[in-house]
Image (spheres, rainbow, N blue to C red):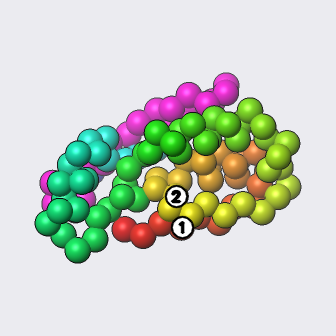
C-alpha cells in the first residue's frame, strides 16, 4: 500500500528481517525527497524515514535482548519507531517520540 502525505512524500511498506521475524513498517523510502521537502518548509518530516541506524539498533537490541527485557526504554527521535517496536517485543516498556 502506498499512502500520500506531506504533498509529494509517499509512504511505502518496507520489510526488515530481524532475527526470525520480518518487521513491516510504513515509511518514506527516498531520503532525498524528505531533504528537498525540508528546504522549502518550516519543519522537515524526518519522522517518516526509516533510518539505517534504526535498523542497526533494532538488530543490536534483538541480539542483546537480555539488556532490555523488563526495562524501561525511551526512544527519542524515533522516526518510524523500529527500535522501540523491537524493544517492546523483547519485553521492554517503551516510550517513543518524534516530531513530524
Question: Quadrant of the rendered structure where residue 30 is?
Answer: top left
Q: Is residue 85 left or right of residue 3?
A: right
Asked if residue 2 can be seen in this view, the reply is: no
Question: Quadrant of the rendered structure where residue 22 is?
Answer: top right
Q: Residue 97, percent across and down?
A: 54, 67
What residue does disc 2 label? 78
> Callout 1: 10 Å neighbours few (<14), some, many (20+)?
some
**Position above or below: 20 against 62:** above
Q: Is residue 35 left or right of residue 96?
A: left
Please give the name of the residue rendered at 24% of the width and 54% of the height, measured from the top-left corner. 35
Q: Report if residue 16 lies within the magenta region.
A: yes
**Quadrant in which the N terminus appears:** top left
Query: Distance from label 2 to label 1 (Cα)?
Result: 6 Å
Q: Are marks 2 and 1 in contact (CB under 8 Å)?
A: yes
What residue does disc 1 label? 97
**Position above or below: 40 against 17:** below
Please give the name of the residue rendered at 61% of the width and 60% of the height, measured from the top-left corner. 75
Q: Give the number of the disc on residue 88.
A: none
Asked if residue 25 can be seen in this view, the reply is: yes
Q: Secondary structure at mark 2?
A: loop
Q: Is residue 97 left or right of residue 67?
A: left
Mark closer to the chain start, 2 or 1: 2
Amino acid at each position: 500500500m502506498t499512502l500520500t502525505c506531506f504533498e509529494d512524500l509517499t509512504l511505502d511498506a518496507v520489510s526488515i528481517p530481524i532475527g526470525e521475524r520480518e518487521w513491516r513498517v510504513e515509511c518514506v523510502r527516498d531520503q532525498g525527497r524528505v531533504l528537498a521537502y525540508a528546504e522549502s518548509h518550516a519543519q522537515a518530516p524526518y519522522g517518516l524515514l526509516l533510518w539505517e541506524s534504526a535498523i542497526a539498533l533494532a538488530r543490536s537490541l534483538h541480539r542483546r535482548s537480555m539488556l532490555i527485557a523488563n526495562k524501561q526504554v525511551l526512544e527519542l527521535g524515533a522516526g518510524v519507531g523500529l527500535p522501540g517496536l523491537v524493544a517492546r517485543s523483547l519485553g521492554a516498556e517503551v516510550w517513543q517520540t518524534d516530531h513530524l
